[in-house]
Amino acid sequence: MAEDPHTGRRRTSVAGTNVPTQIPERLPLLPLKGTVVFPSQVQGLGVGRPKSLRALEAALERDRLIVLAAQRDDDINDPRPKDIYAVGTVCRVLQVGKQPDGVLQVIVEGLRRVTITGFPQEEPYFEVAVALPADTVEKTPEVEALMRAVLAQFERFARLARTVPPDQLVAASQAEDPGRLADLVAQYLTLKLEERQGLLEADPKTRLDQLNTVLTRELAVMELERKIHNRVRKQMEKSQREYFLKEQMKAIQQELGESDERQAEVNEYRKKIEAANLPEHVKQKALEELGRLEKMPPMVAEAVVVRTYLDWILAIPWTTRTEDRLDIDEARRILDEDHYGLEKAKERVIEYLAVRKLSPESPGPILCFVGPPGVGKTSMGRSIARALGRKFVRVSLGGVRDEAEIRGHRRTYVGALP
């Protein structure tokens, strides 16, 4: 130890690159919110609290050395000694600039980790007594293996993150000291405050072990991010390619004089689909088919099939309903008015209507009229429709021998129309 001729305070000897040969045992303290500065790290800080400003002024008046230590709780604006972590970093103030709002923008360089052993002064700024912890470790084969593993993962991290300056990567690859390598790597990782503080306080071997775990986790997340980014990029490229091809198709159709007529047809179908009040699943299917039609050349045979399919979808009364008129006396009057005789058939129809009136939710039986041509089967059905207030629909099955003609084929089958 030696004594400073200007302050009368003792200094601790330190060896290392860009580190003063002696560090005073008492230094001004600047508490930090939400960040930890590692040795070998150059960091920009905003200083605005009165106590911190006075500590910075004291450092500038002496040898520009100051201790940076993190607060345990960021919400405390006027921390006490118990609110500050006991391990911090001695830093050299490189540059100071004043902003319009009075906050000082400071750039510091981390030099060496220190342990705060006491607070001999708390006003007008914190001045702390510091001691240098043992920061050397025997370079055993295990430590050498950890250094190689951390360096390999850090190089891979640098390729993926692209936030590590090349000179820092070179410095890490040339680092012979385990602690220096750990400090160079730690400053570029996104870690919680507690994790960063834990790395600052641990011995070099433990720091390397923790960094190896953190780098493995970060690389796994970054690989996943890269895959997601590539997938999104491919989807965007596919969308852009489709858009480009559609624009080319439109240009070709305009040259051929087909564009306006084709687009008008598509727009007309779209208007009809929107106005038809279709069930949601039917509407989605119709729009899907319309999209296919829009992409097809107009003279392709499949386009005719799709048009016919859309026409049939729009022709079906999906949501058009009539309300049954279950008036037994009026039904009897209409049946007698339209037919003479046929008492059994009329009684069965009236019985059917009575059951529907008493139990409207019941589906009811299917009436089947059997007889030779001309006895009144069709006219009886027409009378029932008139009595109920329904529309009469007649489907002739004369000559039908294949049930598929009733059930229907898939729409690409020849003769699949109803």
Image (cartoon, rainbow, N blue to C red):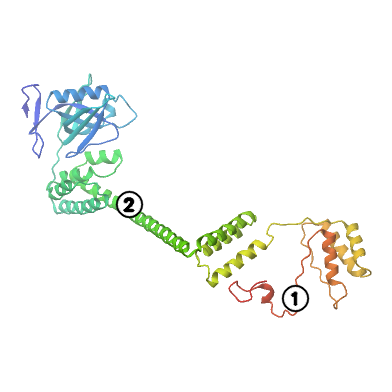
Type of the residue with mark 1: Leu
Residue 273 percent location from the top left of the image: 61, 57
Residue 336 percent location from the top left of the image: 92, 64
Residue 112 visible (yes or no): no
Q: Quadrant of the C terminus?
A: bottom right
Type of the residue with mark 2: Val
Quarter of the image holding residue 52?
top left
Quarter of the image holding residue 264?
bottom right
Foreground: disc 2 or disc 1: 1
Nearer to the camera, 328 or 23: 328
- The residue beneath circle 2 is 221
- The residue positioned 26% from the left and 45% from the top of the image is 189
Mark 2 lies on a secondary structure that is helix
Mark 1, Cα crowd under 10 Å, few <14 / some 14-19 / many 20+, is: few
Is 175 placed above or below 37 here? below
Residue 80 percent location from the top left of the image: 28, 25
Q: Which mark is residue 228?
A: none
Nearer to the camera, 308 or 17: 308
Mark 1 lies on a secondary structure that is loop
Q: Is residue 381 left or right of residue 123?
A: right
Residue 31 percent location from the top left of the image: 25, 29
- The residue beneath circle 1 is 397
Residue 392 visible (yes or no): yes
- Along the polypeptide, which appears first: circle 2 or circle 1? 2
Nearer to the camera, 263 or 211: 263
Q: Is residue 102 left or right of residue 177?
A: right
Nearer to the camera, 185 or 318: 318
Real-space CA distance between mark 2 and mark 1, rounded to the nearest whole angstrom: 67 Å
